[in-house]
Every structure is written in structure tokens, then in C-alpha cells.
Image: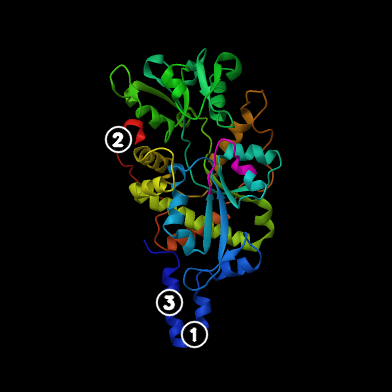
Amino acid sequence: MRRPRAAALTACLLAALLTGAALLAACDPRDDTRAAASAGGLGGSGAGEDAGVPVTAVRLQLQWFTQAQFAGYIAARDKGFYADVGLAVEILEGGTEIVPQEVLAQGRADFAIAWVPKALAAREQGARITDVGQIFQRSGTWQVSFADAGIRQPADLRGRRVGTWGFGNEFELFAGMAGAGLDPGADATLVQQEFDVTALLSGEIDAAAAMSYNEYAQILEAENPRTGRLYTSEDLAVIDWNDVGTAMLQDAIWASTPRLESDPAYRRTTTRFLEASLRGWAYCRDNARECRDLVVAAGSQLGASHQLWQMNEVNKLIWPSPQGIGVIDQASWQRTVEIARGTRNADGRAVLRADPAGPAYTNEFAREALANLRAADVDVTGESFEPIEVTPSPGGA
């Protein structure tokens, strides 16, 4: 696929040779980035690689530790896609004590990756943030049990020890249980689960919270003491909240609402950041193994085999994207809002008390970014996407 703006740049340079060097200044595809830097945009600028063109510094706050869940951003940085649009992006690792939407709202990052219901709850508490790019089209949250436990649907969780991470990760579980006529706090024993599957493997809980791209693989990478071999999918039962109907939108790119409203440089940067990020995700769709290697090199805590599983499963959550990756589907958004308004936390309060006020999301910047990518022959829908085959390895090594 051609690099964005490459054809236009070539034509411009040709014209410059014919008409004089003064035109060369107009040939820089990052010209408005230079203007953004001088206008006091995102936190300063530095010299360009060869041409001395200032670049705009950007801080991206991840939701979790370095892993293939964020491979598209890592690829955009390491393959030079951010540099191509005049951005120098610092990727800030997440963790258990880091709330991305709060980091963004407090001005400590320029963009953040966060699940939609968590971010909407933060907006209701005063965080002025806007979803500018919806990356995951489907939810990756499952509730996993051993097949012989007989847990096949939410109603089967009655009387069971149910693992939950809390921190807003439990909304789909609670909605699914409520839809089955269960009171999560009264009809099951909720167990605070670590962000792994140790409690399920040890028998401390009957059903574990798991992401299709992470904890589920950790089970398949563990030895079944009954057989001496790794667990297989036949040993497990999965409640997929997409099938139940309580799935909510997850990984999205959030931006600062006040800056979108008042800062032209930030608005330009938002389009460029989306363009390069979406290009990174398209690259990882077509180059899963290479992107796995980039993630491992970036310092992932879990091994190469695990990251390849994760890359493959994350691709399944993104592709195909019929409207173009990053576009927020209104029906999916509204369903997320309705589920959040109808779901109560462990303390009995609704996740959302009202529909989101103000500019909670916009497709303006994603559509601009997609137009640039389509012009560069980047496949932004992935209609022909096919996942690869990944075989789990012991410990995910």
C-alpha cells in the first residue's frame, strides 16, 4: 500500500523543480504540523529527521500494560506511520492504578484508550472527553468455566462463585445476570479476581472473567493435571456477552473535548493521529506475526506465543469494519448507553444515570483520516480478513 500523501508530495516536488525552489516549502506534507507547533499545540516540537521540519509531540495513554491489545499504536510508532504525519508519539503504559480517561481529562495525556462505558461514567462525573475513534467493533469479554461445571448461560451463575475484576470491567457480567433474572450481589458469590486465571485453575471460583485475547489463552497455556497436557477449548465453557446481548463497546480513542472545541492545532493533530493509528491497525491485520514481534520488543510481560494469540484475537474484534475502522456505529453506541443505564453496579447504582450530555462522540476526525487512507490505497474495512491459526504454547512462551 502506498504511503499517505506520497503521490501528492512527488507531484509537488516535480513542480518545484520546474518553477523554483520557493515552492519546496509548500511540498512538506506536514506543513500544518509546523503551524500547530508554533501555535502552541500538543506540548512542543522538535527537529524533523532530515528536512528540519518540527514535529508535534503527542502522549498516548494506554488502558493496560504493553501487549498486542495495543499493537496498532506500537506499529504506527515503530513503522514510522506517526512520523509520516509529523507526530512524535510517546506511548504511556497503563496498569492497575492508572485510569486512562482521568489521565486524559487531567491533561496528562493528549489521547487515551478506554472502554466506552467506563469513559462515559467518567464523563458523567465531569471528565470532558470525546470518543473520536472506535477501534474494537466487538466486545472481547467472556465468562469462562470448566465444561463439567455446567455453566452455559448467565442463569447458570446462580449460587456460583463468580470472578469479577471490578473497576468497570464487570458491567457486561452484571447486565447479563440481570437479564437472566439474577441479582449479582445476592444470587451469586462475587469474588474479586486478579487479572489472571489463577483462581479458576485452583478451584477458588467457578467462573472467571476473561478476555478472549488474554486470560482465555492463559488457560489454554496451562497444564491440565488430569491429562498432563495443555487444556483445550473442549475442556472449557464460554459465556460470550456478544451472544447474550449485553456486550458493550470497548477500546476507543478518546480526545480532550475542550481542545477539540477551541484548538485548531489539536483538531489537525487528532486527524493525523487517527490516520496513523488506523494505518497501524491495518498493518497489524495483514502482518500479525511482525506486529507480535514489535509488541514483544516493546516490553510485553507475556511471551511471544501468547502475544501472537492476542494479536489474532484482537484482529477478530476489529475486522471486518464495514464502515471503516474507527467509525463509531450509532446503533452499537446507543446499545452500549442503554445497557449502561439499565445496569446496576455492586452498590446498586446505575452505571449511567442519563444519556451522555454534550459531544460524547464524533466521527468527524475518523472520516477525515479514512479519506486520507483510502487515497493511499489502505484497506480500511478488512472485508476479506481471515484470522490465522495459532497453537497455544506452555506458559505462552
Q: Amino acid at mark 2?
A: Thr
253 and 134: which one is in front? 253
Residue drawn at 51 percent across, 16 percent down: 161
Left or right of residue 157: residue 379: left
Q: Amino acid at mark 1?
A: Ala
Residue drawn at 69 percent across, 39 percent down: 124
Considering the numbered disc 3 on the image, is that residue within a helix, a strand or a loop?
helix
Which residue lies under the disc numbered 2? 391
340 and 229: which one is in front? 229
Residue 84, image x, y percentages: 47, 64
Which residue lies under the disc numbered 3? 11
Q: Amino acid at mark 3?
A: Ala
Looking at the image, residue 91 lies above or below residue 243: below
Residue drawn at 37 percent across, 22 percent down: 236
Dominant secondary structure of the residues highlighted in magenta in the image: loop
Residue 263, image x, y percentages: 67, 60
Judge the density around disc 2: few (<14), some (14-19), many (≥20) Cα neighbours within 10 Å: few
97 in magenta: yes
Judge the density around disc 1: few (<14), some (14-19), many (≥20) Cα neighbours within 10 Å: few
Which residue lies under the disc numbered 1? 21
Task: Give the numbered dot on residue 140.
Answer: none
Residue 379, image x, y percentages: 39, 55
390 and 64: which one is in front? 64
Q: CA distance from mark 3 to mark 2?
A: 47 Å
* Stretch in magenta: 92-102
Considering the numbered disc 2 on the image, is that residue within a helix, a strand or a loop?
loop
Residue drawn at 46 percent across, 35 percent down: 140
